[in-house]
Image (tube, helix red, strand yellow):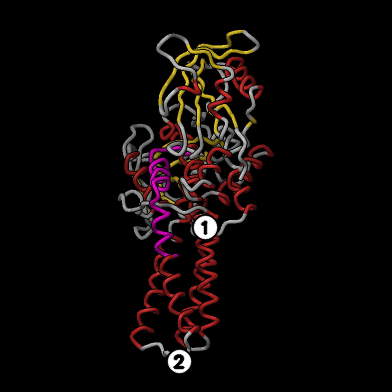
Amino acid sequence: MKTDTIVAIGTALGESGLAAVRVSGPEAVQVVSRCFEPGGPHNLPIDKAPSHSIQYGWIIRAGHKIDEVLVAVMRAPRTYTREDVVEIWCHGGRYVARAVLETLIECGARLAEPGEFTKRAFLNGRIDLTQAEAVVDLIRAQTELGARIAANQLAGVLSRRLNRVRDGLITVLAHLEAQLDFPEEDIEPADVARLTGMIEETVTEIDKLLATARTGQLIRCGVKTAIVGRPNVGKSSLLNQLVGRDRAIVSPVPGTTRDTIEEAVDISGLPVVLIDTAGMRDAQDLIEAEGVRRSREAIDRADLILLVFDGSEPITPHDVELLESTGGKPRVLVVNKIDLPRKLTLDPRLHPVVEISCKTGQGLDSLQEAICKTVLAGDVGSGQAEVMINLRHKGILTRAREAAIRALKLFESGAGLELAAMELRIAANAIGEITGHTATEDILDVIFSQFCIGK
């Protein structure tokens, strides 16, 4: 744990009304005192200011006033880092914020590393590792849904669930180790059943958390959604409708779209990256052939397919080919042009099928609902999801589950309490890696390197 005093700009650089410069560490108050001049008789020098007070004044550098500021003084331990923290609110702009930062460095602070404020909050016991990761998720959240889930994790919802799992494993482990210390005391059959049930409960809880991994990744990174279909079925028109503006060129001439077009939208709280693709058909020239190739790549890397059909025309061999080639991916079948006489017939067993008109906007609400339902399976949309684990959590939980299953089999077979206890210890330590109880310095460096400087 580093004990020096750090400083960083906590707001984005550029023209703005305000910028915040944060200082944390044992010398935070003294560092700011060296360059702060109170702005009037009712404002105190920083080293005389009470905790959680705001003082008005000026930042002074080499005898010159740099900027008119407000300074918040917060003394340990009731701060973000549990160290003395001073925040300076100055005017926004590249020069002013940078000048204040440089002045504080000249007065004894060190420029903070990425995520160092939050890392100190973790190392000082204010938050655990899952809450620290939630800070990044909250900053990067693209939608209300993503922000809500990150806020739940920051509030400790995931931590409490993981701690219950770890406590259950440690309880069983304690019983087994007691038996190993006193082998003359046989484990009663009732105790065997109870301890076995506790291991099974932890495995069930781990399974519930693992089930949120895919959805959590989609909410954090966005759902890559390819709009696919043969030429002139209305793919670009659908993109424009979902985006809410004319993003793609729309023309009655087949093959207008020659390249993929991507646009991010918020659909009922779900971040969706729409990919408009070239019409799938036998290419008429080299440029169109390249567009079709890129379209196939988009289909391969998509999380969801919107397969669009022209409802005013009978189904074609190209439609059938797309039905077959996209059958292995999550998809929504979209029948467009329902404002025209219907000539298309689809197998009613192909679900979900949504009928829309890009011309009138009819059915678009139903399409958005179908997208969310297909991606989220109704879990988040119904308000049941509290947390969504990330890829790091998934790998560790998988390892913990495997160890718990091995312990369960060993315990039930009576093959050796020592081996069962070892597997339970592996599982408990793995859970501790997620919350930070058993995390190594290398793991911490990787996690906090993802943060921006100033957080």
Name the quarter where the C terminus is drawn. Answer: top right
The magenta-colored residue range is: 141-166
Q: Which of these two is toward me, 99 or 256?
A: 99
Task: Name the kind of residue labelled 2 in the image.
Answer: Glu
Q: What is the magenta segment's predominant secondary structure?
A: helix
- Report the disc number at residue 287: none
Residue 437: assigned label: 1
Q: Is residue 198 above or below residue 68?
A: below
**What crowding class fits label 1: few (fewer than 14 Cα within 10 Å), some (14-19), or many (20 or more)?**
some
Tell me if I can see residue 169 in this picture. yes
How many labels sit on residues? 2
Mark 1: secondary structure? loop
Identify residue type, mark 1.
His
Nearer to the camera, 255 or 131? 131
Rendered image: mark on residue 184: 2
Please check the rendered image and state whether residue 147 is part of the magenta-colored stretch, yes or no: yes
* Between discs 2 and 1, the one toward the N terminus: 2
* Residue 247 vs residue 369, the one in the foreground: 369
> Seen in the image, is 240 located left or right of residue 418?
left
Q: Position of residue 213 (x, y in %)?
A: 47, 56
**Residue at 58% of width from left, 52% of height from top?**
300
Position of residue 7 measured from the top left corner of the image (x, y, whole percent): 59, 29
What residue appears at the point 46 percent right and 61 percent down from the top-left corner? 210
